[in-house]
Image: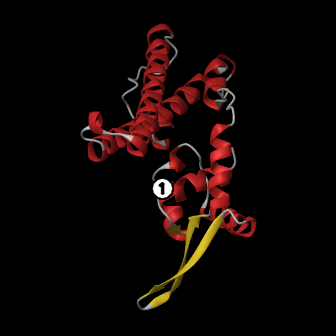
Amino acid sequence: MALEHALLVALREQPASGLELAKRFGRSIGFFWHATHQQIYRVLARMDADGWVTVTEVAQSGRPDKKEYAVSPAGERVLAGWLAEPTPMEPLRSELAVKMRGASYGDRGAVLEVVRANLADHRLRLAHYEQLEKRDHPHPEALTGHELDQYLVLRGGIRLERFWVEWLTEYLESRQARSPEDPARSPEDPARSPEESR
């Protein structure tokens, strides 16, 4: 997959200016396919040159005209072709998992702090996803078409974050129960400040 495909999906959902697309991307597809604003603008220019998008000048009151991008017929064909291609299983590549496995060969306390920090991040993201689910999909049983696709992808994100929260919690609780040398702290505790570590 290339960023072009992610942008084609986003623009099929709704045409947008480069700035609007970058902001919307960060709140949706960007959760599982990261791209900077600069990358998005560069790829949009390439997609325009390749004829995958059309560009319309839209007048704005008191501001310069903006360029609104929409998927062209050629872009629709490219997207449809990519959607039909086989997708290989994506292997898990996790620096955190390697650190957890190798914790015995270094400062275990430092590794545990890294795990706690990651656990806190995953809990925040899980809470955000669950908030989106309640706000945007209060009646999922009534969803069809593209709205159902969006909901099911969000459910996948929720399940993934729950996996990380459960796994990291299990790791911390197991280390605390079996290793007397580990700091006696609950996985619920926030990471120690530099002052506490001195």
Q: Residue furthest top?
A: 178
Side of 150 relative to 64 (left or right): left
* 188 to 13, vertically: above or below: above
Comparing 102 with 21, the one in front is 21
Q: What amino acid type is highlighted by mark number 1?
A: Glu
Mark 1 residue crowding within 10 angstroms, few (<14) / some (14–19) / many (20+): few
Q: Position of residue 144 (x, y in %)?
A: 36, 40
Residue 56 found in image quarter: bottom right
Q: Quadrant of the N terminus?
A: top right
Q: Residue at x 66, y 52 (%)?
A: 77
Between residues 175 and 195, which one lies in front from this camera angle?
175
Question: Toward the viewer: 154 or 75?
Answer: 75
Expressed as whole percent of the image width and height from the top left, the position of residue 136 reads 30, 47
- Name the image colouring: secondary structure
Quadrant of residue 82 in the image? top right
Residue 170 in view here: yes
- 144 sits left or right of 14 in the view: left
22 or 9: which is nearer to us? 9
Residue at disc 1, secondary structure: helix
Q: Residue at x 24, y 38 (%)?
A: 139
Is 145 situated above or below 55? Answer: above
Total label count?
1
Q: In screen coordinates, is 132 left or right of 83?
A: left
Which residue is farthest bottom?
Answer: 62
Residue 101, how many percent across, how many down? Answer: 64, 18
Task: Classify 86 as above or below 67.
Answer: above
Vertical position of residue 132 compared to residue 183: above or below: below
Q: Residue at x 65, y 16 (%)?
A: 104
Q: Could one spot residue 191 in this view of the protein?
A: no
* Residue that extends furthest to the left in the rendered view of this protein: 138
Residue under the point 27% across and 37% down: 142
User: Which residue matches tag 1?
Assistant: 13
